[in-house]
Amino acid sequence: MKMKTALTIAGSDSLSGAGIQEDLKVFSALGVYGTCVVTAVTAQNTKGVWKIEILPETIISKQVDSVLGDVQVDAVKTGMLCTGKIIELVYEKLKKYKLVNLVVDPVMVSTSGTELLNLNPGSLKILKKLIGISKITTPNVYEAEILSGIKIKNPGDMKSAAKKIGSCIITGGDFDDEIYDLLFHDDEFYVFKNKKIDARIHGTGCTFSAAITANLAYGNDVLTSVKNAEKFTPELIEHNFSIGQGDMKVLNPFINSEKILIIENLKSAVKKLISDENSYKLIPQVGINIVMALFNAKKISDVAGISGRIVRDRKKLVPVGSVKFGGSSHIGRVVLTAMKYNSEARAAMNIKFSGDILKICKKLNLKISGFERDQQPEDTKTMEWGTRTAIENLGYVPDVIYDKGGFGKEAMIRIIGKDAGGVVDAACKIGRLLE
Ligand code: PXL
């Protein structure tokens, strides 16, 4: 079977969080081979858009012919088209090549407020013609107002605007504390509710429409494609992160690849631990867990762990359950807390406490800190409070955090490190030196 292919006709973004670069990343992340036609080059970063150079129509036209004259693309997406003339050119070309799966993202202004389309009655008219040959268009509320001529002040206005535009999904409706996208397709309305995120995020619109495009390229219908894009995009938005000095955040479309790498790291760490001849000496009564978090983890489901822990069977360690995200709430919380102080402290593992083990940790030059359970304030969670206390006592994230237990609570040592393999290596070193 031929690899599914898509084409994006859009602007280049030097920050690479939107435009051509983001579209290509999304296509790749979703298993579709991406091709591109660049309409303009923007110089921008997390602080704003600094310069836009629109490319001559001759080279835009030649790029389209080069790709579509050669490759049979399964879906096309348009983004920043800059001028009515370029929209006209794209419209004529797409009609000529008889492409059926077209997604029009009617890009007008950047999140930072820079105009990306020279909007006038002429460019608006031809943009509407382009939308007329698309499977779906993905305006935000502002763009939907321009396209429909309807001021969107309430959910009813949003529906009226959608009906006027035709097959579309209007994104970012914000009424009565509810954020939602409204799909109008085949004469039906569908609502997709989303969480409100308090951040300026670059490229969300491009990501969403590129995800729809990749789905159409796969042969999915419009409704399925939108539903899939509505699953894909919010997860990336939730994991938005900073990349520069400005306040604009970006997305990582490859979050699932990152998850797979973490699972692999954790699985091979578990393998190494259970095949180590001394590791059984380290097991506490409650068993061992090893965790590793996504690089910008914020919640337990962002941390991979062993769902049922590692237990002891005579001189052997045996993993119970499977390695998965959300697999450990206990050690998971140690890492989530440590990462607030040092974003590289993404992995942890618990081993049993003993004076001898602590001595070996010192001998190995590991940085050590601890907390005392009887000092824990009532309204706190032990793993968060204990980790925070141990870190703040020392002034930085240590390699080892211990506590000597309490009533009904086993004493414990937690090894902290950059990845699961690293913490297991440290544990095996400790095990080797233990009598
Ligand atoms: O998100 C809209 C957009 C599209 N294309 C390019 C952009 C932006 C926003 O900044 O820079 C090239």
Image (spheres, rainbow, N blue to C red):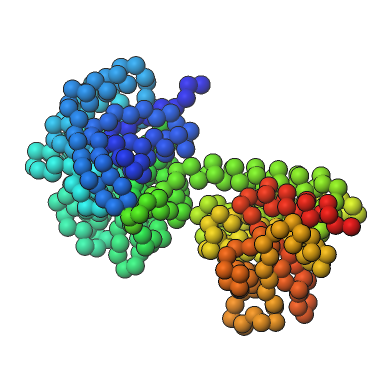
Please count the marks in the image.
0
Residue at the location (71% across, 43% down)?
A: 268
Q: Position of residue 367 (x, y in %)?
A: 67, 62
Task: Name which quarter of the figure residue 377 lies in.
Answer: bottom right
Q: Position of residue 137 (x, y in %)?
A: 28, 42
Q: Pick the quarter of the image with the C terminus.
A: bottom right
Q: Nearer the viewer, residue 64 or 416?
A: 416
Q: Nearer the viewer, residue 171 or 344?
A: 344
- 328 lies above or below 6: below
Residue at the location (18% across, 22% down)?
A: 58
- 67 lies above or below 367: above
Residue at the location (86% across, 47% down)?
A: 277
Q: Is residue 96 left or right of residue 316?
A: left
- 39 lies above or below 228: above
Task: Name which quarter of the figure residue 72 lies in.
Answer: top left
Q: Position of residue 193 (x, y in %)?
A: 39, 58
Residue at the location (73% across, 65% down)?
A: 413
Q: Which residue ends up furthest to the top in the rendered image?
A: 70
